Amino acid sequence: MTYTHPHPYSSNFVYEQQVDGFPNAIELEISFGDFSETKLNEGFVVLCKNSTCLDNWGNYSGSTFPGKLSNSALIIRTTELFIQFTSAGVNSENNWGFELTVTPIYTYGMFPSIFISTVPYYLFIAVVHFICIFHGTV
């Protein structure tokens, strides 16, 4: 899922967004778009653990963001986060702001419920079909 705002961002801009809704995921991969850039030390993107933003996974300003261009993506062990972007002044340089993509990560045995509910059924049908073919009843 991708999160963004109007570009370029306005002066004294505030953007806040709760990110959740990834059942059975164990981690989230965070990648910022290649155009992401804020006014250094005045425009901050904070990836918070919750809406209070007292604890966070990263505070980014300027042009160096995880997943941007050749930078490695940020992997966090959670299924939810809160994005907070604030600009503390005039965006005189017409900085673009940010765009970030959140991708859920699953491991073996931890797939979306639609997969869990259908795989055993189809596996059962395949096994029964194989047995019938082997015994010549199909």
Image: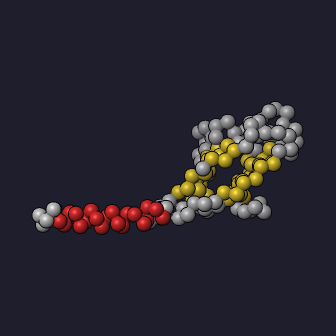
Q: Residue at x 81, y 32 (%)?
A: 93
- Left or right: 13 with respect to 127? right
Which of the pair 7/86 is nearer the observer? 7
Which of the pair 117/93 is nearer the observer? 117
Question: Where in the figure is residue 107, as x and y percent of width and height?
Answer: 47, 61
- Left or right: 118 with respect to 75? left
View extreme (left): residue:
136
Which of the pair 50/60 is nearer the observer? 50
Question: Where in the figure is residue 105, as x and y percent of width and height?
Answer: 53, 57
Name the colouring of the figure. Answer: secondary structure
Question: Where in the figure is residue 123, as x and y percent of width and height?
Answer: 31, 64
Q: Residue at x 35, y 66 (%)?
A: 121
The quadrant holding residue 36 is top right
View extreme (right): residue:
89
The quadrant holding residue 69 is top right
Question: Where in the figure is residue 24, as x and y percent of width and height?
Answer: 53, 64
View extreme (top): residue:
93
Q: Residue at x 30, y 67 (%)?
A: 124
